[in-house]
Amino acid sequence: MTSVPNDKPAACPVCKQADHSSFLMCKDGYDLYNCAECQHIFVWPIPTIEALKSVYSFANSYQVQGRTIYDENTVICEKMHESLKQIESFCPRRGRLLDVGCSSGKFLWLAKQHGWSSVCGVELNKDTAQIANDNGLGVFVGELASADYPPSSFDSIHLGDVIEHVRDPADLLSRVSALLQSDGVIVLVTPNHDALFPILTFWLHRQLGMPWSHPTPPHHLNQFSDKSLDKLLQRVGLMTIHRQYQGCDLRYELGETHVLRSFRQALRERRLVLAAGRLLFAVFTAGAYTVIYGIDRCCVWKKKDFAMLFVVRKASCSGQPSPSCAFVPDDAGLTSNTSSGMSATYRWNRF
């Protein structure tokens, strides 16, 4: 894959500083760096937009799915239901909604069923965007910067598992903010590398040489923590009014270690001794990840988890959030609860 020239030091996309960043690891041929200032993890050098367009396509086996016309039997994942629930809890009206990185448009279709008057989407993958447009969802194929929507034209904007994919998350959030009504809300969902599961599996990587599942380059160019996401939102003039967390998917995380893929490759090459060794390593890795997953799920007192959902809006005219919107940890008087709309592992903290 083509990347930007590597003749500059790695600059953190959140802090925009290079002197705080240091090499962390290499995965799938991509170098990842860690910012000591804000805990952000990012790919450097950054792949070009032309290279990313190639990645996000059926030809590269990304989100391959059949042409589907949505109806009442269409299965919508629980995460999308929860995102829409939070939008409707904080948005004053069901007017115009934009989904950035909308894939095949299931979230937009769900919003239409909930009575939103107008839904639009932006998607880089022309193949999944075609499925959305086949369902009459009005999806623009390309980057948000090229979509040419008028300023302040949306009541709510959804960024579901998309900010980790983009080359410049600060630029994306600035553009999203400009498209938002003054009283509108943004719901942003992204993985959190500062949760117990990724912390413990990174320890396995460092101590035992096991693959670390959390970073998935070149699809995920940015790995946020709640600290780095807070800093980025503040930098672009947005404030968090609600946040909640969800546990990880063990099957997905095991897949991102690539240990079974490595075993199958050795089998295809008829290198039986190597295949046997890789199979043992895969079993050992799966066992260790399963134990850590069990520990992670048993730690019910955790204040944060693997996946973050932030509800944000534009800051006040003074540029400072009101005191009622400041995050207060549980030990300051609030309690952690379980959202009625999610599984028991979906825990959240109210503001």
Image: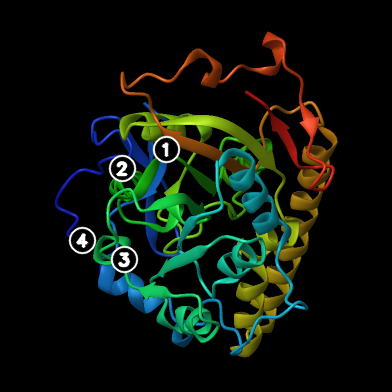
Q: Say which label, 1 or 2, has the lower sequence index.
A: 2
The amino acid type, in three-letter code, at marker 1 is His
Colour mode? Answer: rainbow
Which label sits on residue 4?
4
Instruction: Say which residue appears at 60% left-offset and 34% top-offset.
Output: 243
Relative to 69, is 240 above or below?
above
Can you name the residue that lies furthest to the top here?
Answer: 332
Q: Report which residue position mark 3 lands on.
A: 143
Q: CA distance from mark 3 to mark 2?
A: 18 Å
**Residue 53: quadrant of the picture:** bottom left
Which label sits on residue 40?
1
Q: CB under 8 Å between callouts 3 and 4?
A: no
Direction from residue 68 to residue 343 in the image, left or right: right
Q: Is 210 or 162 nearer to us in this picture?
A: 162
The amino acid type, in three-letter code, at marker 4 is Val
Instruction: Say which residue appears at 76% left-offset and 25% top-offset.
Output: 336
Q: CB under 8 Å between callouts 3 and 2?
A: no
- Residue 66, x across and y down, in percent: 61, 89
Q: Report which residue position mark 2 lands on.
A: 13
Q: CB under 8 Å between callouts 1 and 3?
A: no
The amino acid type, in three-letter code, at marker 2 is Pro
Q: Say which label, 2 or 4, has the lower sequence index.
A: 4
Direction from residue 153 to residue 268 in the image, left or right: right
Q: Quadrant of the N terminus?
A: bottom left
